[in-house]
Amino acid sequence: MNRPRSPDDPIPLTLFLSDLHLGRGSAAESAAAERDAVALLRAHEAEVVATGGALYLVGDVFDAFMEYRHLVPKGFVRLQGLLAAWTDRGVPVTYLAGNRDPWHLDYFERELGVRVVQEAVEEEVEGVRAYIAHGDALTAAEPLYTRLRPLLRSPFMARLYRMSLPGDAAFAFARRVGRTVSSGGAVNPAVADDLRAHAARILSETDAGLVVLGHGHRAECTPMPGGTYLNPGYWFADRRYGRLDAGVPTLRRWPEAVAEAEPPAPPGVHDAAPPLR
């Protein structure tokens, strides 16, 4: 998806955001998460546009999303409008569907110019071979969800659900069920460790030099044999995000002024990795 580059082109900047969970918590909490995401993107907009960079939304942008043929959930139009403005300016934006927001039709692609991917993408990102996915398909630490995932992702089941319930009732029921089974955003160490282990396997068994996953809500940028594992973390609560520029994946906190105040990272977890080759 990246345009051909010449040696004289500026070094592109690519951003990764995951697990915004817009619609979670109180209205004020979700509004703040959206407001900060928009502020982050606006702060980087000039550099991303000027360098020919890109944006990846690594799943669970919404805490629930139920698109009908003529209806989409209301709210969070500030972020959506900014995504449309970026794609209008030629910035590639990719949305990896998560476990909370897989039931898209064509609204994001047709109206906003955003590429929506249901599973994983494997592609060159500024010269680095990358594997990018939300990550919910890669962990065995959630056995009930693992068994139900094929059913929940089935286009037939999505159509049946839409046909069975009107928009308001369908969305309200989906939100209620989601909140009932939700962990509330708490990190499940078994899930986070599973994702890291899968990233290590992908890096060792494929030609990928960068693996980007969400879902685990544990932010990390971990060098491994063969490349780097980047998890942007749980934006809704932690305001973490990832960058790839000059061949270096990094993990940042927004706003940048509080980056020095974060607690020490767990063993093996780093905020920056060596340049990828």
Image (cartoon, rainbow, N blue to C red):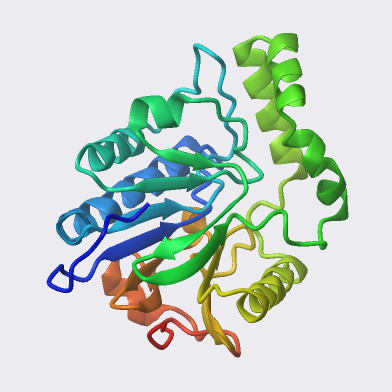
Residue at 57% in and 43% down: 97
Looking at the rendering, which quadrant does residue 202 occupy? bottom right
Does residue 20 sit above or below 263 in this rendering?
A: above
Quadrant of the rendering where the C terminus is positioned: bottom left
Residue 101: x %, y % from top left: 59, 38
Residue at 50% in and 55% down: 18
Does residue 27 sit above or below 4 in this rendering?
A: above
Looking at the rendering, which quadrant does residue 68 occupy? top right
Residue 10: x %, y % from top left: 16, 69
| Res. 212 visible in picture | yes
Residue 86: x %, y % from top left: 25, 43
- Image label count: 0
| Res. 240 visible in picture | no
Does residue 5 sit above or below 112 in this rendering?
A: below
Q: As rendered, which of 185 and 148 lies closer to the eye?
A: 148
Does residue 117 sit above or below 64 in this rendering?
A: below
> Would residue 147 appear left or right of 276 to someone viewing this image?
right
Q: As rendered, which of 269 and 185 lies closer to the eye?
A: 269
Residue at 48% in and 81% down: 263
> Would residue 36 appear left or right of 219 to someone viewing this image?
left
Residue at 81% in and 47% down: 145
> Would residue 151 appear left or right of 87 to someone viewing this image?
right
Residue 159: x %, y % from top left: 70, 18
